Amino acid sequence: MNKDELHALKIAFTYMPQAIEVNKFDHGDNYQTILDHIEIVRGVLLDNDIDPDEVGGEINPGSTPNSFY
């Protein structure tokens, strides 16, 4: 994956729902597919040495709370 493709994936990931937000009530029978897709993207980010939990801060630094660790 080249640099531009990886950056595009990071941007798309910031607009995906968090797994904790996906449930059957809101997403119907498709909720498991959505969870699977989220995990696939997280896996690709991890395979490229990118922490998925830090992507939001990198892409949108002004709208991400500061971390204390």
Image (spheres, rainbow, N blue to C red):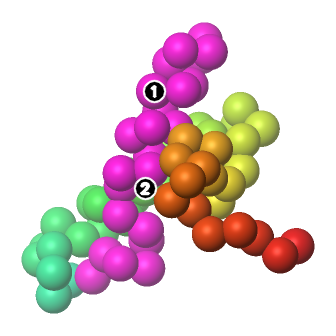
- Residue 19: which quarter of the image? bottom left
**Which stretch is magenta?**
1-23
Q: Which mark is residue 38?
A: 2
At label 2, counting other C-alpha atoms closer than 10 Å, the crowd grade (few under 14, some 14-19, many 20 or more) is: some
Mark 1: which amino acid?
Ala
Residue at horizontal 43 percent and vertical 56 percent from the top: 38
Q: Is residue 54 above or below residue 29?
A: above
Q: Which residue is mark 1?
A: 8
Q: Residue at x 77, y 38 (%)?
A: 49
User: Could you tell me the amino acid type at mark 2?
Assistant: Ile
Q: Nearer the viewer, residue 62 or 29?
A: 62
Quarter of the picture holding the C terminus: bottom right
Is 34 rendered above or below residue 48? below
Q: Position of residue 37 (x, y in %)?
A: 37, 52
23 relative to 56, above or below: below
Q: Quadrant of residue 30?
A: bottom left
Image position, residue 7 (x, y; %): 54, 26
Q: Nearer the viewer, mark 1 or mark 2?
A: 1
Question: Residue at left 71%, top 50%?
Answer: 51
- Foreground of the two, 27 or 51: 51
Viewer-closest of 38 and 8: 8
Query: At which x and y percent is residue 63?
Result: 51, 59
Report the residue that reaches farthest toward the right: 69
Q: Quadrant of residue 21?
A: bottom left
**At x 83% / y 75%, what residue is drawn?**
68
- Decide which of tag 1 and tag 2 comes sooner along the chain: 1
Instruction: Assign the N terminus to one quadrant of the image.
Output: top right
